[in-house]
Amino acid sequence: MNTSSAMRWGLLLIALFLLLSMGSFFLLRSQLSGRSPVLPILGVAPDFQLTERSGSSVSRADLAGAIWIADFIFTRCPGMCPLLSTRMAALQQKFPRAEGRSLRLVSFSVDPEWDTLERLQEYAEKYHAHPRQWMFLTGPAQTMTQLITQGFQLSVATAPPGSQEPILHSDRLVLVDASFRIRGYYHGSEREDFDKLQQDIGVLFHE
C-alpha cells in the first residue's frame, strides 16, 4: 500500500471513530435527559415524640412511608411565619391527600411556651390546615430547641432586646423522603426556592 492510500485509510478510520463517538454521546445524553434528577441525601430527620394541636402524641414513626415537609414557625410571629404557613397551605392545595399522594406537612413550634394547643389550633384553622395532612407539633422548650438545632441542623434563638420578632429562626422548608432521609433545604421566603421544592416533591414521588 502506497503512502497516499495509507493516508486515505487513516483519515477514513478517524472520521468513522468520530462519528461513532458522537453517536454514543448523543445516545447517552438522550437517555439521561429522560431520567428524573437524583436528589442528594443530606442527612436523616431526627426522631421525636411531640404533641399535636389536637392533643394527640405524634412520633417520627407516624410519618413512615410518607414524603413530608417540615417548617418552623410560631403563632405570634409578625415576620416570616405567615409567609411560611402560606407556602405550606399552597403545598396542601397542590398535593392533596385525596389524590393518593402521601405528602404530609409538619410545622414545629419554635415558641412552645407561648404556643399552647389552643393557639396552635387557632393558627391551623387560619390556614385551613387539614388535620390528617398538616400537623402542628410542640413540646418542652429544650426538646424543641435540640430537635431544630441538632436534629435538623437549623438555627433558632431568642432575639436580642429591641428586635421586631421575639424569636429568630430559619426560614427553611425541609424535604424528607419516605425513609426519613433529608433530601433538600429550601428558603421558604424565596419564590425560586419554593418552586424548586415543588419540582423536587414530584421527583420523590417518582423515585
Image (cartoon, rainbow, N blue to C red):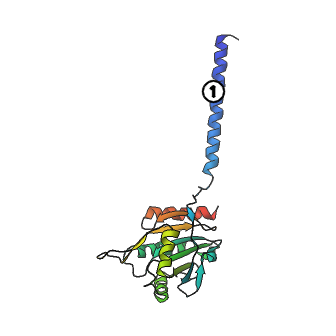
Q: Quadrant of the N terminus?
A: top right
Q: Which residue is mark 1?
A: 15
The type of residue carrying mark 1 is Ala
The number of callouts visible is 1
Q: Position of residue 167 (x, y in %)?
A: 38, 76
- Of 34 and 76, which appears nearest the observer? 76
Image height check: is 49 above or below 66? below
Q: In this image, 95 relative to 114: left or right? A: right
Mark 1 Cα-neighbour bin, 10 Å: few <14, some 14–19, many ≥20: few
Looking at the image, residue 84 sits to the left or right of residue 26; the answer is left
Q: Residue at x 58, y 86 (%)?
A: 56
Q: Secondary structure at mark 1?
A: helix
In the image, farthest residue toward the right: 1
* Residue appearing at x 63%, y 77% in the figure: 62
Instruction: Give residue 98's position: percent from left, percent from top.
Output: 62, 76
Q: Give the percent coordinates (x, y) of residue 55.
A: 55, 88
Q: Is residue 120 left or right of residue 101?
A: left
Q: Give residue 86's quadrant in the image.
A: bottom left
Give the position of the C terminus as an image quadrant: bottom right
Q: Nearer the viewer, residue 65 or 60?
A: 60
